Image (tube, rainbow, N blue to C red):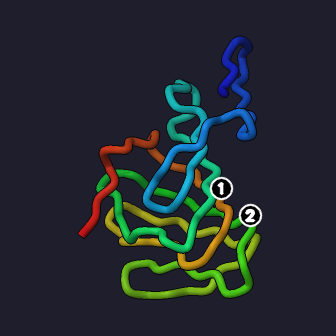
Amino acid sequence: MTDSSSRYHLADFADIQGVPCPCGIARRAFQGVSEFPGTMHVTEISDSAKKHYHKTLTETYYFLECESDAKMELDDEIIPVHPGVAIVIPPGVRHRALGTMKVLIVVLPEFDPADEWFD
């Protein structure tokens, strides 16, 4: 839930309902907050993440938790990741996570579910 009763906005991800996404389950915050041009997601990624891309969104992944063999597929390159790593994924980059992990994702501009594309 996002609290906007003050001059600041607070999101407690424990109170945000998770929604299915191509990667697993996403908890999305700050939709419609005029002072923030994007959204922030905590996403629990499953082993069955689907490769996808966005035509207008840039996503920045920050890895919070993952197994020692976790990887990201970015276009045709596979790179290892671990907690503390961040990756900026511009529009058009086909991507998916390989392995089970928990990721903080900052999306600019604001997330739009219609901007998820599959080959």
Q: Position of residue 69 (x, y in %)?
A: 67, 87
Dot 2 corresponds to which residue?
64
Question: Which quadrant of the figure contains the C terminus?
Answer: bottom left
Q: Residue at x 36, y 71 (%)?
A: 94
Count of marks placed on residues = 2
The amino acid pointed to by label 2 is Leu
Q: Residue at x 43, y 59 (%)?
A: 22
- Indicate whether 111 appears above or below 23: above
Between 88 and 17, the one lying in front of the other is 17
User: Which of disc 1 and disc 2 is earlier in sequence?
Assistant: 2
Dot 1 corresponds to which residue?
104
Between 16 and 116, the one lying in front of the other is 16
The outermost residue toward the left is 119
Q: Residues within 10 Å of mark 2 (few under 14, many from 20)?
A: some
Q: CA distance from mark 2 to mark 1?
A: 7 Å
The amino acid pointed to by label 1 is Leu
Question: Which quadrant of the figure contains the N terminus?
Answer: top right
The answer to whether marks 2 and 1 mark residues whose Cβ atoms lie closer than 8 Å is yes
